[in-house]
Image (cartoon, rainbow, N blue to C red):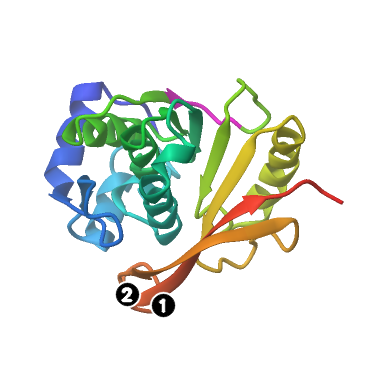
Amino acid sequence: MKTKPTSDLLEFLLANTTLGAPPLVPEIRLRLADNVFQLWERTEGLGTANPPPPYWAFAWPGGQALARYFLDNANSFRGKTILDFGAGSGLVGIAAAKAGAFALAADIDPLAITAIRTNAAENNVQISCIKKDMIGRDEGWNTICLGDMCYERPLVERIAGWAHTLKKRGARILLGDPGREYFFKSNVDRLATYEVPTSRDLEDRDMRETSVYELQAKV
């Protein structure tokens, strides 16, 4: 996607979303898509061929589970530095900020960065944003969050080595996952499980059992 001026991206965001609350995290307000398929088509018209899908316009189950976990366990994260990787709407980073953490939300889509900033303002929290692929980087974060990232094998293969390297130096790696096909097969401990209402426009069922996991060191 060609990077449009910020004002154009914000205008597009506001025209194609409404303010709502994810069902598992009613404490947080997000700009979410009104019409899934219409938004997909309109996003394609924003730039050149193959723009990123508008993942930022939906509260995915894995992100909702991570956000719920942050809010329910705020004492564990207060004052910590958090990377919300592939942040999309910024839901996880916003929840981390509400829990008292210092959150950095990273995404490669300029529309996602616009959504994150807008959603953070709607929730009266401050989070940092960066438009960059963070795989391979390490800026000393205490916790790295991976919400609903295990939907493609090549992406998971890239993430896995990076995540284990971060774990080895002492970072916490938290994953929110509703049973995606390429989820980590080993070295994860389940921390919490939630029933997350979903949309048939995005999922194959009305409710997905979604868990928060912590990556463990390889043995």
Of 44 and 108, nearer the camera is 108
Is residue 219 shown left or right of residue 146? right
Q: Nearer the viewer, residue 27 or 76?
A: 76
Magenta-colored stretch includes residue 156: no
> Regarding mark 1 in the picture, which secondary structure is present there?
loop
Amino acid at dot 2: Arg
Q: What element does badge 2 sit on?
A: loop
Q: Is residue 188 above or below residue 159?
A: below
Most distant residue in the front direction: 75
Name the residue carrying label 1: 204
- The spot of residue 5 in percent (x, y) is 26, 21
- Residue drawn where x is 58% and y is 30% of the image: 142
CA distance for labels 2 and 1: 6 Å
Locate residue 106, reporting x and y percent.
46, 31
Q: Main secondary structure of the magenta part?
A: loop
Q: Position of residue 193 (x, y in %)?
A: 48, 66
The boundaries of the magenta stretch are 130-134
Residue 131 lies within the magenta run = yes
Viewer can see residue 22:
yes
Rendering coords of residue 114 (x, y %): 28, 31
Q: Is residue 5 left or right of residue 91?
A: left
Disc count in the image? 2
Residue at screen point 55% across, 69% down = 179
How many neighbours does mark 1 have within 10 angstroms: few (below 14), some (14-19), or many (20 or more)? Answer: few
Seen at 66% across and 58% down, the residue is 189
Looking at the image, which is closer to me, 53 or 104?
Answer: 104
Looking at the rendering, which quadrant does residue 93 occupy? top left
- Where does label 2 land, which residue? 200
**What's the amino acid at mark 1?**
Asp
Q: Are marks 2 and 1 in contact (CB under 8 Å)?
A: yes
